[in-house]
């Protein structure tokens, strides 16, 4: 019976042909969780480079539809602890990525809305007793929103982040450098306010 129920639900979702919801003129609130996979080691002065492991990431932000196909987004993601493997015992890495971006959204005949995006990133980190200076860069991202109804969408996204190298500083002494190049994968939920909420 349960299998039959699941089969019916999946068939219903796959056969849905209603036009995807537009977010033109609408503000959305996003919450998400996922992973961050660093693509560059930390450079440690006077020793071997330190490997940064894949870690948990969570965050949220705002999205606003400029029209049916274009949207702007403000996003903050935080990784509370990514293990660092190093002979110099730097400790775990924490990072916060503040980003501003633009999306191009592909309206379809389904409830799914794929999108591509790009934007600017401002990244700050800490490693226990050390501070990682601000890094500045950008990102490319791709994702999809699935609209459960007009106000709620489930979202999934992958983001590629690049940025300038920044110093790792402890007690005024530079201990190494951090390169923020990474992949970030997340899933989450968007809650959209009505079109006339600001009228």
Image (cartoon, helix red, strand yellow):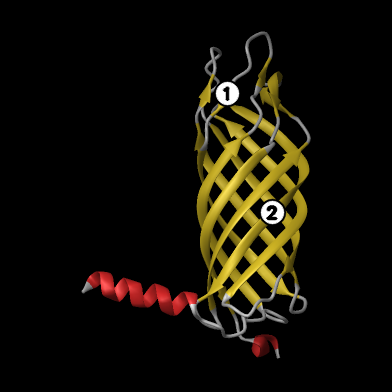
Q: Residue furthest left?
A: 1
Check disc 1 and report its element: helix, strand or loop.
Answer: strand
Q: Gap between marks 2 and 1, in whole Å?
A: 24 Å
Against 154, is 175 above or below?
above
Check disc 2 and report its element: helix, strand or loop.
Answer: strand
Mark 2 or 1, nearer chain start? 1
Q: Residue 57: where, in percent of width, then height? A: 53, 47
Q: Which of marks 2 and 1 is in front?
A: 2
Foreground residue, 113 or 35?
A: 113
Q: Which mark is residue 161?
A: none
Q: How crowded is mark 1: few (under 14 residues within 10 Å), some or many (20 or more)?
A: some
Image-based side of 131 in relation to 34, left or right: right
Q: Residue 183: where, in percent of width, then height? A: 63, 42
Residue drawn at 57 percent across, 23 percent down: 51
Q: Residues within 10 Å of mark 2 (few under 14, many from 20)?
A: many
Residue drawn at 48 percent across, 74 percent down: 14
Against 121, is 144 above or below?
below
Q: Residue 32: where, in percent of width, then height? A: 52, 58
Residue drawn at 58 percent across, 68 percent down: 145
Foreground residue, 192 or 88?
A: 192
Image-based side of 59 in relation to 72, left or right: left
Q: Residue furthest top?
A: 46
- Locate the C terminus by quadrant: bottom right
What is the quadrant of residue 94 in the picture?
top right
**Residue denoted by label 2:** 141
Q: Residue 101: where, in percent of width, then height? A: 75, 59
CB under 8 Å between callouts 2 and 1? Answer: no
Residue drawn at 57 percent across, 38 percent down: 37
Foreground residue, 90 or 25?
A: 25
- Locate the N terminus by quadrant: bottom left
**Residue denoted by label 1:** 51
């Amino acid at each position: 019976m349960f299998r039959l129920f699941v089969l019916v639900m999946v068939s219903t979702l796959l056969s849905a042909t209603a036009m995807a919801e537009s977010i033109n003129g609408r503000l959305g609130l996003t919450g998400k969780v996922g992973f961050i996979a660093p693509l560059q080691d930390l450079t440690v002065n006077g020793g071997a480079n330190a490997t940064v492991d894949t870690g948990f990431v969570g965050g949220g932000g705002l999205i606003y539809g400029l029209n049916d196909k274009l949207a702007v987004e403000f996003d903050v993601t935080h990784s509370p602890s990514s293990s660092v493997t190093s002979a110099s015992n730097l400790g775990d890495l924490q990072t916060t990525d503040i980003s501003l971006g633009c999306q191009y959204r592909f309206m379809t005949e389904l409830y799914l809305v794929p999108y591509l995006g790009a934007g600017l990133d401002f990244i700050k980190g800490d490693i226990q007793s050390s501070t990682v200076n601000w890094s500045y860069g950008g990102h490319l991202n791709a994702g999809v929103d699935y609209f459960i109804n007009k106000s709620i969408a489930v979202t999934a996204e992958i983001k590629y982040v690049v940025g300038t190298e920044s110093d790792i500083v402890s007690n005024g002494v530079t201990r190494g450098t951090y390169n923020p190049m990474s992949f970030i994968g997340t899933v989450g939920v968007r809650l959209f306010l009505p079109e006339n909420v600001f009228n």
